Amino acid sequence: MLLQLIASSFSLGSFYALIALGFSLIFGITRAFNLAHGDLILLSGYLAYALYKGLGAPVLLTLPLCMLALPIVTVVLHRFLRHVREPFELNTLVVTFGLSMVLQNAMLLAFSANFRLLPKADFTMLPPESTPVLNPGQIFLIALSLLATAATHVLLHHTFLGKALRATIQEREAARLAGIPVERMGVVAFALGGTLIGLAGPLYGQSAYLQPFAGPEPTLTAIIITIFAGVGRTRGILLGGWILGFVESAAALVLGSSWREMVAAVLLIALLLLRPEGLLTLRPHRESKA
Amino acid sequence: MDAKTHTSQALVLLRTAAVVLLALFVLAVLPTALPAQSAAVRIGEIDPLTGKLAKHGTEIHEGIVAAVEEINQRGGILGRPVELAFRDDQSLPETAINQAEDLLYRENVLGLVGGYVDSLVAPVSELAAKHRIPYVASASLQRSLTQGRHNPYFFRVAHLDGIVRPLCGFVTNVLKARSIAILHSATPGSTEFAEEIRACLEAAHLPVTLFEKFRPGSHDFSAFLMKARQAAVDTLICGGFLPDHLMLVRQLKDQRIPVRHYIGPWGVAYGSFIEEMGRDSEGLLGMCAWNPGITRPGTDEQSQAFVERFRARFKKSPNSTTMHGYVSARALLAAIESVATTSTPLTGEAIAAKLRTVDIATPMERLAFDEQGDPKDYHQVIVQIQNGKMVAIYPPERATGKLE
């Protein structure tokens, strides 16, 4: 059972990480606190659902299509948020809260209040009676999560664009003085974030369900994981997702299903008290006394 | 600025203020001073039309609209048209209270109808009692709302016994389960249901090996399913709602948990559930009080007529929740009509008194209320999904097929 628990935790944690990656990237680079993040994931999920139901597109094919479509939405959102005045974080929070409500009602009009589910990719290679520790759907989810995290990490740490993006995360004004076009970095961040949101949408429609008002939950998950990881820490996102997944699953197994959120909340509070900078963020060295 | 100019400016300001106040007064008084709007009979509805419960709230709303349009097509209540003032509670109890207050204070409705889940129904029922306005709830189960502290203005068209008794009989007599797991949502109605079904099954010496609750809206049931596998559960009863079943059944199939019978009293017996789950819904068991084709004996024609009218109006099929909305509105309208035929003024007290004597035949049930406001005759049937269709399999007198 322990092996099963670990496997389920990895799968759940990978799902959480996929939800959080786009939020973390956008917040880290632009400081835009996007409360409509979950609604954008649902929008991507609904787009995949429409392609699947309306055009009969296989779910696997909807992934790249959504990854192409959502950046358009997020770049438009970026252009809109450019007009937001200081204090930027707080004002974007208010503006995107409003956007969240607009998106919810638009999705209600377009897709009704029915609960929608995307089919899982059809893997028929397993013998019918076998009970593997990880089922193919979970393996697919973990693989995609690892791939998305690795791609984001490589982009941020091993390319010139990534260096510019990280410089913007670390010190916006210094980056501007060094000649980095920080405004353009914002567009890039929203486009990259949109790609990750586009990827998360169809997977959300498979692992959870689509409903026009279900957006606040993935938004909350993304915020929690970002706090776990520390801003701009892509590997920390995955680690945070896995830890949260493990804690939730273990609490449900040992204490009962109703305890999972309570234990996760206690963990989050403890982390905020003990490591407010995030799991993988190095603490600044204390200045030695003169 | 001299004193004269100052005085004349003050006078202008005073005059403007007086005109504005007068205009506001006229606007406030005008609606009551004018003759009543063709003396329409106004009833109010509060339902979750947005938010997480929007699906079922919308279904109830459509059932209520169907009942109001039906009576208006017959000429209304003694020639007076019925008007429905409906409000969206956004699936939030505090909004439900605000909207109910709006209907009671501003819209002056004669009665309230609608409501989905007890957390939204309970506060409205208390407000209705305070205003002495009857409230016929469409979907409410919690016992404490009708028993213990009696509220003479509260009525509902469903009760828990109508679900627990047939389900307990089915699991005991038909399934003969060896190891039962009960998982329920942490809502008042679902919790009461789970405790009562456990007590009933244990009284019949059936082993309930796993009993757990979960937060509504949970997406991950893998830990619970691990325990179900270890306990060799062969019958799983889930007191969750439609989205919970979508998640649980999918994970049950993904993890290949060898559960023989899956029962979801709420949420499985829906066309939309079958559509989303596809082949994975085959063999699942659900419950309903009515569905097209699953109707109270002797009401087939009435049921079919309702289905046809509904499809023509809403371009979709009604379901059990729709019927609960329709029946609750029918009850309230029947009581109002009954009062209107006498010389008694149409007051909340008079309508509530008439609701206690209402006796109407509907495709779902023969509706009459007991002293607490619960329906006297409410029995759900067990259905199984077979070849993409719902087939009634228990109790035997309502069965149209057999358990597969």
Image: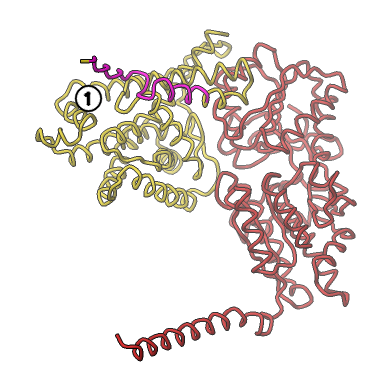
Chain colours: A yellow, B red
Q: Nearer the viewer, residue B50 or B33?
A: B33
Specify the segment rendered in magenta: A266-289
Q: Quadrant of residue B380?
A: top right
- Residue A73 percent location from the top left of the image: 31, 45
Q: Is residue B136 magenta?
A: no
Q: Chain of mark 1?
A: A
Quadrant in the picture for the C terminus of chain A: top left
Amino acid type, callout 1: Leu
B184 on left or right of A214? right
Q: Nearer the viewer, residue A192 or A129?
A: A192
Residue placed at 76% from the left, 43% from the top? B141
- Residue B36 percent location from the top left of the image: 69, 81
Q: Quadrant of residue B251?
A: top right
Q: Up-down: is A103 above or below A186?
A: below
Q: Main secondary structure of the magenta part?
A: loop
A194 on left or right of B167? left
| Mark 1 neighbour class, 10 Å CA radius: few under 14, some 14 to 19, many 20 or more | some
Q: Looking at the image, can residue B123 be seen?
A: yes
B175 on left or right of A49? right
Residue placed at 78% from the left, 16% from the top? B178
Q: Up-down: is A226 above or below B19?
A: above
- Residue B159 percent location from the top left of the image: 80, 43
Q: Nearer the viewer, residue B77 or A256?
A: A256
* Residue that badge 1 annotates: A155
Q: Up-down: is B314 above or below A208?
A: below
Q: Is residue A284 magenta?
A: yes
Q: Secondary structure at mark 1?
A: helix
Q: Up-down: is A246 above or below A50?
A: above
Q: Looking at the image, can residue A144 be seen?
A: no
